[in-house]
Image (cartoon, rainbow, N blue to C red):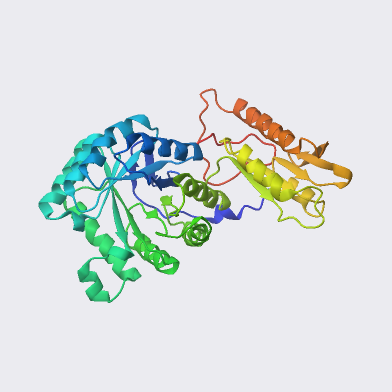
């Protein structure tokens, strides 16, 4: 296709840092994060939750470390998972020292909450000694008293001033391996704060709408807020904050990136809302396919359209397409061209088989080491081998 509006997205130029094996900022792919909700001291439960998030495609996982028991469990957690771990630290600077020694890839702190300059200096030394980066996490719900007195309420200016004030703490110590977030539960406040911060500095930005709500409402709020920022080229790593399981946050994060054509992973299903013209039950079919194809990592597009009004047109733009027909016979398209018909019985199994065969074909065309560059802008023409390997 010649029309690719997502190629108009120009990312803000930022410094690049490392969170374990994941690069953040610069020209690195925008990474997807989540946070565990198990008691961190329960290493087995926390590891199991992280592994589910890994299957969903998470790049970085944050765990809360409020006490010594949590940091004591951190070494085992880090050892048993395949993604970098960010230790969430509040107030107790010793937890940061312990987390760095336990193998955390990043420390999430507010330098102003850690205590004296000497304590901040100790945390920075531990981060430097153990190869940790730092995230400065500013939140509208916990702004410093002097900023609330100055501005009267949380606003974009207060969030940005807080972030840059904290950043100065680290820069004074010649520490530059940090990223910044300025989160709020209000979409307008968060977006405005990130816009101002993006203009004020070149630090990599972790974006998110905090405390967004449950799975449905939180997905909507996050999609509006994060979508607006990403469309403007702002954001180097993201977390979708939902009152839901961590893997759900990961799925939504990926769907936002995929919708904007920024990154591609797994099967992208284009489906109609269904109507009286449908030749098969679209809603049930799509639900079954989403579940059956969740394990696929290779980028691939699949259109599931209930009738011939839009079906053939959508099939032109997807790797595999299905259009509902009459008398229980449905047309299957491959690389935008009619391929064969299929019946109603065993329809989902048949489509899953087509997708898995296409994935095998794409993998066979990949470099022998199985690796390919992450694709941040562009999807192969229908039927062409994907240029992007599984994440």
Q: Position of residue 205 (x, y in %)?
A: 37, 54
Q: How many marks?
A: 0
Between residues 139 and 205, which one lies in front from this camera angle?
139
Between residues 264 and 70, which one lies in front from this camera angle?
70
Q: Quadrant of residue 302?
A: top right
390 w.r.t. 92: above or below: above
Between residues 304 and 372, which one lies in front from this camera angle?
304
Q: Residue furthest bottom?
A: 152
223 w.r.t. 359: above or below: below
Asked whether the viewer can see residue 317, the reply is no
Q: Quadrant of residue 334?
A: top right
Q: Residue furthest top?
A: 368
Q: Could you tell whether 87 is left or right of 299 in the image?
A: left
Q: Position of residue 354 (x, y in %)?
A: 71, 33
292 w.r.t. 3: above or below: above
Q: Position of residue 23 (x, y in %)?
A: 38, 41
Question: Residue at point 18% right, 50% down?
Answer: 92
Question: Residue at point 66% right, 31% down?
Answer: 356
Q: Position of residue 271 (x, y in %)?
A: 69, 50
Asked whether the viewer can see residue 148, the reply is yes
Question: Residue at point 18% right, 46% down?
Answer: 123
């Amino acid at each position: 296709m010649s029309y690719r509006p997502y190629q108009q997205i120009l990312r803000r130029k930022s410094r690049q840092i490392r969170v374990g094996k994941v690069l953040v900022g610069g020209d690195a792919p925008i990474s997807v994060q989540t946070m565990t909700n198990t008691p961190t001291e329960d290493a087995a439960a926390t590891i199991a939750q992280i592994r589910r998030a890994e299957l969903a495609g998470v790049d970085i996982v944050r765990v809360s470390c409020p006490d010594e028991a949590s940091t004591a469990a951190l070494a085992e957690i880090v050892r048993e998972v395949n993604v970098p771990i960010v230790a969430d630290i509040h107030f107790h600077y010793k937890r940061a020292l312990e987390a760095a020694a336990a193998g955390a890839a990043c420390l999430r702190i507010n330098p102003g909450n850690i205590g004296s300059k000497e304590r901040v200096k100790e945390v920075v030394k531990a981060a430097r000694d153990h190869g940790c980066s730092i995230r400065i996490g500013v939140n509208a719900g916990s702004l410093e008293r002097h900023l609330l007195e100055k501005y009267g309420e949380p606003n974009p200016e207060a969030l940005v001033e807080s972030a840059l004030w904290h950043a100065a703490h680290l820069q004074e110590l010649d520490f530059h391996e940090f990223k910044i977030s300025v989160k709020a539960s209000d979409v307008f406040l968060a977006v405005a704060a990130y816009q101002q911060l993006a203009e004020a500095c070149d630090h990599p930005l972790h974006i998110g709408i905090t405390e967004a709500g449950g799975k449905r409402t939180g997905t909507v709020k996050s999609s509006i807020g994060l979508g607006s920022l990403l469309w403007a080229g702002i954001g180097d790593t993201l977390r979708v904050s939902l009152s839901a399981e961590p893997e759900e946050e990961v799925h939504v994060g990926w769907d936002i990136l995929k919708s904007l054509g920024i990154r591609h992973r797994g099967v992208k299903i284009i489906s109609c809302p269904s109507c009286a013209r449908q030749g098969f039950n679209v809603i049930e079919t799509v639900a079954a396919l989403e579940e059956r194809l969740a394990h696929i990592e290779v980028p691939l597009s699949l259109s599931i359209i209930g009738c011939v009004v839009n079906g053939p047109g959508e099939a032109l733009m997807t790797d595999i397409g299905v259009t509902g027909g009459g008398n229980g016979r449905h047309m299957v398209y491959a690389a935008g061209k009619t391929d064969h018909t299929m019946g109603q019985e065993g329809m989902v199994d048949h489509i899953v088989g087509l997708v898995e065969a296409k994935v095998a074909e794409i993998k066979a065309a990949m470099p022998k080491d199985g690796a390919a560059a992450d694709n941040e802008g562009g999807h192969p023409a229908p039927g062409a081998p994907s240029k992007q390997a599984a994440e």
